[in-house]
Image: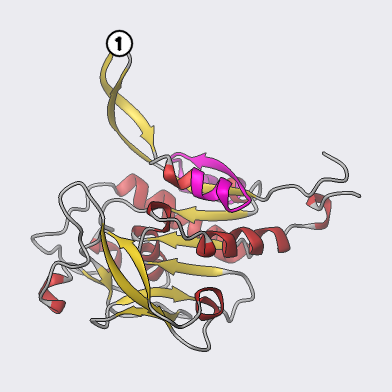
Amino acid sequence: MTHGIAQRPVIGISTYRTTAAWGRFDRRLAVMLPERYPALVRDSGGVAVLLPPDAPEHAPAALARLDGLVIAGGEDVDPLLYDEPAHPRTEADAPERDAWEAALLRAALAGGVPVLGICRGMQLLNVVRGGSLIQHLPDVVHHEGHAGGEGSYGRHAVRALAGTGLGGVLGTESVVVPTSHHQAVDRLGEGLTVCARAEDGTVEAVEDTAGGAFVLGVQWHPEQGEDLRVMQALVGAAAAARTPELQPVG
């Protein structure tokens, strides 16, 4: 332990399995995460560790070593998890990831570990809490403004709601955020509160302030922008929630 120097909170970030090629090797199975996620944690005052998919029963042991948890963006959540048939545009082909990240979320929520869900991570948080998803948002809002272009992120305005924790972080003026999603919250999960919306009414963030721990999901991708405030809020909550034996010694 370093004495006299404030220690950075350790933030775990979920990753996924996919095939990739590097160096002289052909495509083979790899554990992946866009570098902007750990960079955002680092720039916000934390230390990032990557959490590859694992057996769900190992989630509590992983969380016991972390100060905070980020569930990253990615594939659609399997609609079987909220008892609905798949929409023709739903691409849910990561059951191992679904199971692992759901276990991480449940362990974090049970243990009071601060949580930030990003895009898919927000959607999975809602599902774990018993909510459901709009499987193809353009069917509801009648535009593609949330999806971005092929291989790129779009941008649109969101507004945090007055009286919410996120409103205290971002204020209640509209902010423009990086976005890339075609699904969104439908039925709100138990204990969650909507804390931001897009101009078309889409739920853009949810939070749980009743349980005492920091629990936030945002539909946009803060790691693709320059605004650190959302991640700084998680890192700050993780620092505040450290157990006494993990506090720096002066």
Whether 140 is among the magenta residues is no
Whether residue 161 sits left or right of residue 148 in the image: it is right
Element type where label 1 sits in the image = loop
Does residue 86 lie above or below 17 as drawn?
below
Q: Tell me, what colour scheme is on the image?
A: secondary structure
Whether residue 21 sits left or right of residue 122 in the image: it is left
Whether 58 is among the magenta residues is yes
Relative to the observer, which residue lies in front, 138 or 82? 138
| Residue 237 percent coordinates (x, y) | 65, 64
| Amino acid type shown at disc 1 | Arg
| Residue 117 percent coordinates (x, y) | 44, 61
* Farthest right residue in view: 250
Say which residue appears at 54% left-offset and 49% top-offset. Answer: 41
Whether residue 76 sits left or right of residue 149 in the image: it is right
Does residue 239 lie above or below 64 as drawn?
below
- Label 1 crowd bin: few (<14), some (14–19), many (20+), radius 10 Å: few
Q: Hey, which quadrant is residue 141 in on the image?
A: bottom left
Say which residue appears at 46% left-offset and 48% top-offset. Answer: 56
Say which residue appears at 65% left-offset and 59% top-offset. Answer: 238
| Residue 15 percent coordinates (x, y) | 41, 43
Which stretch is magenta? 39-61
Does residue 177 lie above or below 141 as drawn?
above
Say which residue appears at 39% left-offset and 77% top-offset. Answer: 189
- Camera sees residue 243: yes
Question: How many numbered marks does the figure carry?
Answer: 1
What is the quadrant of the N terminus in the image? top right
| Residue 244 percent coordinates (x, y) | 83, 57
Whether residue 203 sits left or right of residue 118 in the image: it is left
Q: Hey, which quadrant is residue 35 in on the image?
A: top left
Q: Which residue is mark 1?
A: 24
- Camera sees residue 131: no
* Farthest top residue in view: 24
